[in-house]
Amino acid sequence: MVVVGQRGDVGLGERLFRALGRGVVRYRWVILVLWLVGTAVASRALPSLGSQVNNNNSAFLPASAPSNLAAQLAGPLTGPADQTLVQVVAVSSAGTLSAADQSSLQTMADALRKVATVDLVQFAGISPDGAAAQIVVLSSRSPNDIGGDKTLIASMDSVVGRYESTALQIHLAGSVATQVANNKQSQSEGKQTQTLSLLLIIVLLLLIFRSLLAPLLTLFPAAVVLVLSQALIGGLGSLGLKISEITQLLLIVLVLGAGTDYGLFLVFRVREEMEAGRSAHQAVEVAVARVGESITGSASTVILALLSLSLADFGLYKDLGPPLAVGIAVMLLAGLTLLPALLAIFGRATFWPFRLRQREQQAGTWGRIAARLIQRPALSLAVGILVFGALAIAVIGYKPGGFGGNLSAPPGTNAALGNAALRQHFPEASQNPTNLIMTLPQSAWTDPARLERATSLIKASGQFTKVSGPLDPNGTVLTPSQLVALHDQLGTALDLPTAEPPGTTVPATLYNAYRATARFISAGGATVQWEVGLEAGAPSTTAAINAVPTIRTTFTGIAKQVGATASGVAGEAPALNDVSTISDRDLKRIVPIAVVVIGIILALVLRSLVAPLYLLASVVVSYLASLGLAVLVFVYLAHQGGLTFILPFLMFVFLLALGEDYNILVMSRIREEAKRLPLRQAVVRAVGATGSTVTSAGLVLAGTFAVFAIVSARQPGGSSVESVGFGLAVGVLLDTFVVRTVLVPATVSLFGRLNWWPSAMGRSRPEDPTATGPDRLVARSGPAVRR
């Protein structure tokens, strides 16, 4: 029998993890039951994660963002900033709205006023072609409360459906209806990502282990954690935590990918210990003792990097960190308890039909590669850096643009039909306008000349295409004198009914035009706005986003010329420009913090102040190469206008954290072997022993990110986040096959015992003078793991 002994000096960390392994083996059945029961209870008691997804990036902006300040300035027109606005568009199949149609819409408006949380129902006017009418509904539901939005849209759909007919088509439109439609699609997309990721991982694990049970046991804890963490984070979402589509998808990818990685770290070591002659229970205990600290260090780097996002100003990043950190923390707990318990329960049957037998194993492929590379470590390191540098040059062509969600409603949905009807029957700016807002020193009802001058300056600026405003509210032009006369005769536009009241002598065209001014001039006349299209392009395009600073400067100048006391620019393009600006600022602030935190974790795990420096540097060069490759593919080859603004930030944070996972595993094993072997032999032994583990883990994690990219690319209506999945997949592969294979072994060999300074291992130890050739180096490195 093989006694569970110790190899070299055993530190406090290994003793603690050995005790943990012993306890897990002893109470394995209790641990399994606790995990299963706890997950079942949480998944039934808490709301689903998908029901809490919010794709509106502007919802994550701080209140001080210029676009939010502009939206607050428009409060007298749109209602309080904490209200939700929904558009209703009705289209006559006959080509002209009849008196009966307008009467039906008036009755529908009365019914909408009775919907819970609806505060205001306002007619925005009839289209210039007379075929469509637009109604604006304000609800006291807080904006971006996705649960409340879904309830509101469902209630309004129920009312609207009672007044629809073959002669009158009625749809909900605008950002809220679009958001609810996208939320439903996001849940479907999340299920696709989860299903495809599970299938991919199972196939890869079957190929890796060549056994039936090992893949299922490796993946089972990650699947349990995914269900549990989705319930926990869904509960946090119901309490106010904003959750984006990217959070939902990255949680699936991280838990399944990183969770399987941690499982591979442990399962491979358990198999190695069994092949060394230990019993199943002894092998589990030793494996937890030997790799438990590596797994904990790896997960800690990811958790702390994610928590550093809490310091961001941009809410998408700020709210992205905690949910994903929860998922990884739960995965760490499962990796140290549930998986070892399962391995202890199933024992050697885990690897059936693969036969485990005690043998002195020879160096595998990775050991032989490492042996040859470290014969000339400086050359190997230089070649690796040159390859990365060549890819990194493409970063120069990086152009920010796009966003992290889909702003278009899925094709065929009610929201998509409503948005299409707005584009067809109303001015271009009315469906997705950029809003120019002013506060005037005097009411427009007493001083309408300012409106005329401001409108002329806006049209003459060259920045805008279609302009709708107080003097052109629905395609019908009003003179300042007509506007004042209509106000004196009809009163507040907001209070006017759809159909002109009997006895009114105002022509129907002027009546409808004046009624439409309600969304451009406040009741008191002090707040006015214009809805414009942008000369630079559609609001979501890179060109339009980049044009926002010029637009703001231009409109501020116009506001000063007409004597306005305040002004602002709101809408999609201004919001996305603010998002991009704040995201860049967060990148500069969060990255140094994340680097320092992860550096501390590396120093603690490796007991060194030197190794963390070059390990962090290796991830930086890998990140630049990955980003450069993403630029080559999406900007130069796919001819996209730019990459989503979240790509550099998320790639750095995730590759920094995940890239160190493999470095920790390899370096910890090198350190373990270096306690009893000369350093270069220890490198060969460690790389040979961990080669299959890291390669398998890298393929699994990169594969899950690739699934994320593919599902996002196939999303109806398009998506710009596939570049995030692509960049992360490429980064993981570079870390797996270049950083771990070339850069790290070569650098360790160059630094020698200085790798472990200032620990006791940093003291010089003579190398074996007979181990000079790569073949001898492999032969003298002791039993190596063949995989």
Image (spheres, helix red, strand yellow):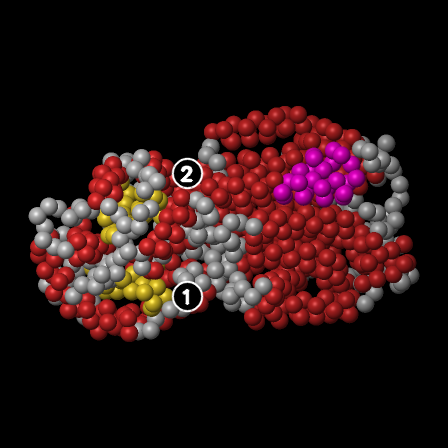
Q: Nearer the viewer, residue 231 or 22?
A: 231
Please provide percent x and percent y for residue 154.
Answer: 36, 37
Q: Nearer the viewer, residue 520 or 787?
A: 520
Please provide percent x and percent y for residue 713.
Answer: 56, 53
User: Residue visible at 47% across and 32% down?
Assistant: 46
User: Residue visible at 68% across and 42% down?
Assistant: 201
Residue 682 location, quadrant: bottom right
Tell me the quarter of the image containing the N terminus: top right
Q: Earlier in the sequence, mark 2 or mark 1?
A: 2
Please provide percent x and percent y for residue 350.
Answer: 76, 33
- Dot 1, crowdedness within 10 Å: few (<14), some or many (≥20)? some
Q: Secondary structure at mark 2?
A: helix
Horizontally, is 450 left or right of 230 in the view?
Answer: left
Placement of 554 over or under 582, stated as above or below: below
Q: Amino acid at mark 2?
A: Ser
Q: Amino acid at mark 1?
A: Gly
CA distance for labels 2 and 1: 37 Å
* Dominant secondary structure (helix, strand or loop) of the stretch shown in magenta: helix
Horizontally, is 260 left or right of 522 in the view?
Answer: right
User: Does 770 lie within the magenta span?
Assistant: no
Please provide percent x and percent y for residue 495.
Answer: 16, 48
Q: Is residue 233 visible?
A: no
Q: Secondary structure at mark 1?
A: loop
Numbered range of the magenta stretch: 196-219
Give the label on residue 537, or none: 1
Q: Nearer the viewer, residue 584 or 155?
A: 155
User: Residue visible at 73% across and 51% down?
Assistant: 695
Placement of 636 over or under 286, stated as above or below: below
User: Residue visible at 87% across and 45% down?
Assistant: 361
